[in-house]
């Protein structure tokens, strides 16, 4: 029964974590676009977005990440045999990379706060798709639990992602004409 409660909290944690990351990077887009606003509005908007970003990072993303990791680790302590499964080892690597992305986002907040960010709003829109790849990969691994099928599925998702990227780039160029 303990395992089911931990699993439930783990799912709640990662859903909240991803929601926070998606919202956070979307605010990066708006923050970058604030540079195009009239000077009278620009600084107030940037300050507001920075405050909102810190709130999301500290109040949603950090606690959700900690819940996800804590409950996941407790499930492994409860059932250490899971660690022998290849899909879980791959999932853990993806989680470490996702945590790196999380920390990287903190650096972006600091750069935007100091007005040193070099990303465009379009680049932030693309960066916002990265957690989608993590989400798809992690869920596929957790459900399919077969590395070979996962590889095929994930390659298909990557191909779809690249198609979306090139479509977005083409659309952007079309709009600029």
Image (cartoon, grey):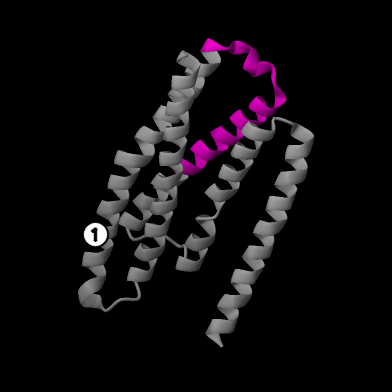
**Residue 121: where, in percent of width, then height?**
45, 67
Depicted 47 relative to depicted 68: above or below: below
Is 101 part of what is drawn in magenta? yes
Horizontal placement of 161 versus 148: left or right?
Answer: left
Span colored in magenta: 78-103
Q: Label 1: which residue?
A: 48
Q: Quadrant of the C terminus?
A: bottom right
Counting other residues with Cα less than 10 Å from the Cα at mark 1, is it few (<14), some (14-19), or many (20 or more)?
A: few
**Residue 30: where, in percent of width, then height?**
37, 65
Q: Residue at x 46, y 45 (%)?
A: 104
Depicted 71 relative to depicted 41: above or below: above
Q: Residue at x 45, y 62 (%)?
A: 118
Q: Secondary structure at mark 1?
A: helix
Q: Give the number of marks.
A: 1
Q: Residue at x 40, y 28 (%)?
A: 67
Report the magenta stretch's main SS. helix
Q: Nearer the viewer, residue 76 or 51?
A: 76
**Residue 6: where, in percent of width, then height?**
45, 21
Horizontal placement of 42 versus 123: left or right?
Answer: left
């Amino acid at each position: 029964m303990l395992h089911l409660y931990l699993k439930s909290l783990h799912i709640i944690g990662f859903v909240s974590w991803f929601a926070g990351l998606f919202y956070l990077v979307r605010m990066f887009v708006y923050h970058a676009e604030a540079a195009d606003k009239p000077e009278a509005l620009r600084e107030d908007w940037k300050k507001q977005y920075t405050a909102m970003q810190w709130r999301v990072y500290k109040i949603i993303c950090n606690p959700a990440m900690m819940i996800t990791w804590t409950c996941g680790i407790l499930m492994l302590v409860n059932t250490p045999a899971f660690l022998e499964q290849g899909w879980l080892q791959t999932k853990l690597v993806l989680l470490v990379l996702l945590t790196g992305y999380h920390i990287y986002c903190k650096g972006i907040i600091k750069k935007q706060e100091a007005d040193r960010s070099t990303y465009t709003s379009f680049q932030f829109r693309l960066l916002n798709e990265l957690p989608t790849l993590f989400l798809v990969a992690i869920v596929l691994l957790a459900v399919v639990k077969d590395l070979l099928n996962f590889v095929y599925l994930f390659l298909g998702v990557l191909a779809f992602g690249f198609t979306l990227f090139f479509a977005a780039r083409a659309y952007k160029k079309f709009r600029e004409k």
